[in-house]
Amino acid sequence: MGGRDTDIVLLDENGIRCDGRKVNETRKVTIKAGVLKNANGSAYIEFGDNKILVGVYGPRDVHPKHMSDTDTGILRCRYHMAPFSVGERKNPAPSRREVEISKVIKEALEPAVMLKEFPRTAVDVYMEVLQADGGTRCAALTGASVALADAGIPMRDLVAGCAAGKAADAVILDVNNEEDQAGQADLPIGYMPNLKKITLLQLDGVLTPEEYKQCIEIGIDGCNQVYEIQKKALQDKFFATGEKQ
Amino acid sequence: MSGERKRHVIPGEVITSGSYRAEQNTIQVGDNIVSTIVGLSDVHDGSVRVIPLTGGYMPKDDDLVIGKISSHSSLSWTADINSCYVGMLPASDVFGRDYSSSSDDMTAKLAKGDLIAARIVNADMTRDPLITISGRELGKIDSGELVKISPNKVPRLIGKRGSMIQMIESSTNSQVTIGQNGLLVVSSEDPNGLLKAIQAIELIEEQAHVANLTDQVNEMLESKSE
């Protein structure tokens, strides 16, 4: 962070970013729910050039047994990048970064899922990044919440993820890989749109208090846009054929 | 919001607001009643609930379930009841109160892999649900075809006051034992009737969310009987 010197023009004089977007525009997001037959719930999300597959299993027996909780079900998340998801081969063993993202995504989903109804069980969420292009934690979080809803896990709200940030001294929405590498700040946000609550907030880089406020504002706006797509994915799977009863 | 009509809802969606009781699969957030699951909202007599379209089976007291014996200890059998919890069938339920682990052979009565029709006695979630096979229509299942459907579609298969299942049974000349956990046993003297009944059940499973399903199933049952 902190603005590395590169040849790339992050923001041109017309306010257009390196991939042709405006400053307050997200990348194209498509989500499909229920793509895996063997999982209880699943989703495939394309967030710009990010491609992530999410499978949800459970509620099911907890193994190892000592992890189970007699008062509540537990949520376990695994974020993993496939070796072919980035330019240079990534070692498939879990890295520090993947362990961290698994943890923050778990903590971002926990306020939404209601696992008190399933004591002594576990819900496992597996997120597999097939292709990465910056902002995978937000994309994985978004997909995971659709997959959880698809699995029929009771939730207070869906969680939508979208990052805001700063590149070329401008506050931007939905930071892509180039902007993440050469930009000045990245602020991923996880947000429950109906409850209006933030469940994930990280900041890599430096922002002034004013910029921070702007980032939160446009970030939440981005999450609301992503939420509409999540909603559509679930509606397409469950209500597409046939009319209302 | 008019309310009475069923609406498609997803988690977090506000169903209605005002003085309603939040029942199954809903929570109250401030003044609003919010769905927690993907399903059909049902506002009725001042209460709001959501009929789920996805999710597994959660054991409830007095439910009839069909289970498969998965193992046994010296005191009880465990049965897979298509849920995240396993059913516990105490040996005393089969052998009576004077059961002794040294003299009675548990595998002689129920072996691994046997199917049972059981009723849930106690499902308080603090331990695995207790089941019983003593009672009418309960016990070991010796014949019939096992069909698995989504537990959420069981009410649709039964229909209003059993209308749908009665229609299938009478027109295919078969008997269907419905477990609330989504496992069914279909039996019939007539092999064609058996096949037709299974096809009808599969049709209901596929088309559960469609209105006037009864007509569609009736049509299917009649067309094949010619």
Image (cartoon, coloured by chain):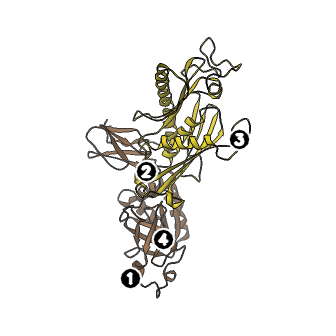
Chain colours: A yellow, B brown
4 and 1 marks on the same chain: yes
Percent across and percent down for residue A98 are 61, 42
1 and 2 marks on the same chain: no
Percent across and percent down for residue A92 are 69, 46
How far separated are the C-alphas under marks 2 and 4? 24 Å
Callout 1 amino acid: Gly
- The tag earlier along the polypeptide, 2 or 3, is 3
Relative vertical location of residue B41 with respect to residue A59 in this rendering, above or below: above
Quarter of the image holding residue A171?
Answer: top right
Do callouts 2 and 4 mark residues in contact (Cβ within 8 Å)? no
Callout 3 amino acid: Lys
2 and 3 marks on the same chain: yes
4 and 3 marks on the same chain: no
Which residue corresponds to mark 3? A90
Percent across and percent down for residue B99 are 41, 84
- The tag earlier along the polypeptide, 4 or 1, is 4
Which residue corresponds to mark 2? A115
How far separated are the C-alphas under marks 2 and 3? 34 Å
- Left or right of B203: which side holds B119? left
Q: How many marks?
A: 4
The kind of secondary structure element at disc 2 is: helix
Q: Nearer the viewer, mark 2 or mark 4?
A: 2
The kind of secondary structure element at disc 3 is: loop
Q: Nearer the viewer, mark 2 or mark 3?
A: 3
- Left or right of B46: which side holds A28? right
Callout 4 amino acid: Thr
Percent across and percent down for residue B144 are 52, 71
Q: Nearer the viewer, mark 1 or mark 3?
A: 3
